[in-house]
Image (tube, rainbow, N blue to C red):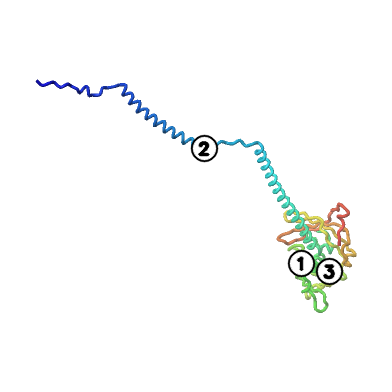
Amino acid sequence: MAKKRKNTSKQNRPQNNPQGGEKVINQLLGSLEEDNNIESDIADLGHEAEPQVQEEAVPEPVKKRKFFFGFALFVIVMAIVGCISTVRFVVNFTEHLVDNTSLKNEFAQFIFPVVVNDIAPFETVDEIPNTSKITCSIWNILIMKDTAPYEGEITGDLLIPEYDVSVSCKELFGNNASVEHQSVGIGEVRFTYDPDNHVYSASKNIRYLTYAPHIVDITEANGTYTVIVGYLPPSLATVTGISGMEVSPEKYMEYTLDRWDGKNTIKSVRFSDYEPETEEANTNPI
């Protein structure tokens, strides 16, 4: 009889061990947790590698030094700005004085022929006597122009064409001024008119005792200048040429001048009520 084989399959099969399974799961989970801990540790190491910047407290003396340095720098800058402003003011003021002096000299030279003749006051050019316009015009040529072309070959006197006299009149009193040509003046300051040759004859060595202009004050409004002119009287210095003597104006006149494109025109002459403030201001060297 054949012997029955023992069924050993059940013995050889591993039996389910609940505790062993838990160990395996715990081991697996433990390994996963360890892996997570490693990653967190690496992340922590990365954070620790970054240096932490901390603001250092600035000592109080350093703050004060910075404040005073900034304040000193501000003071220096303002001082430089002040110096520049002062220099500009001085330069502008000096230029103003120079320009005013230059304008005074220009006006004095321009009105000299009228002051020399002590022309009567007028408000419009039509009020000026014809003889006054002629004498002022000829004096304007004698004082302001080169008289060499007018010298005559025979008598040595100056022969001034009437056309030049008419032009000179317009230079002084404007384009509306005109003259009727005739002989004017007396003695050595007589200007003889030759109607045939249309010329005026005048001595080229005139010694005269007349007024000289001294510009006292100038005011301007819209291109029109009001000029206070002191009339310096004849003096020994005028005759002999001695300089350094002091004289006082005998009277003051008010001139109204138009100035356009560098050209001047006398519009009116009036008496002035100007009075000098001091005795010193009332004297002028010759």
Mark 1, residue position: 168
Q: Name the residue type under label 3.
A: Val
Residue lying furthest left = 1
N-term mark: 1 or 3: 1
Closest to the camera, between mark 1 and mark 2, is 2
Residue in the image at 83% along x and 72% along y: 204
Left/right placement of residue 103 relative to residue 67 reads right
Q: Is residue 248 above or below residue 20?
A: below
Percent position of residue 18, x then y: 30, 21
Closer to the camera, 8 or 263? 8
Residues tagged 1 and 3 counted as in contact (Cβ below 8 A): no
Residue lying furthest right = 236
Closest to the camera, between mark 1 and mark 3, is 1
Closer to the camera, 198 or 212? 212
Percent position of residue 235, x then y: 89, 63
N-term mark: 1 or 2: 2
Query: Based on the displayed image, in which of its 4 quarters is residue 42 positioned?
Result: top left
Closer to the camera, 109 or 80? 80
Mark 2, residue position: 51
Mark 3, residue position: 184
Percent position of residue 232, x then y: 86, 60
Q: Is residue 67 above or below residue 278?
A: above
Q: Name the residue type under label 1.
A: Ser
Task: Check disc 2 and report its element: helix, strand or loop.
Answer: loop
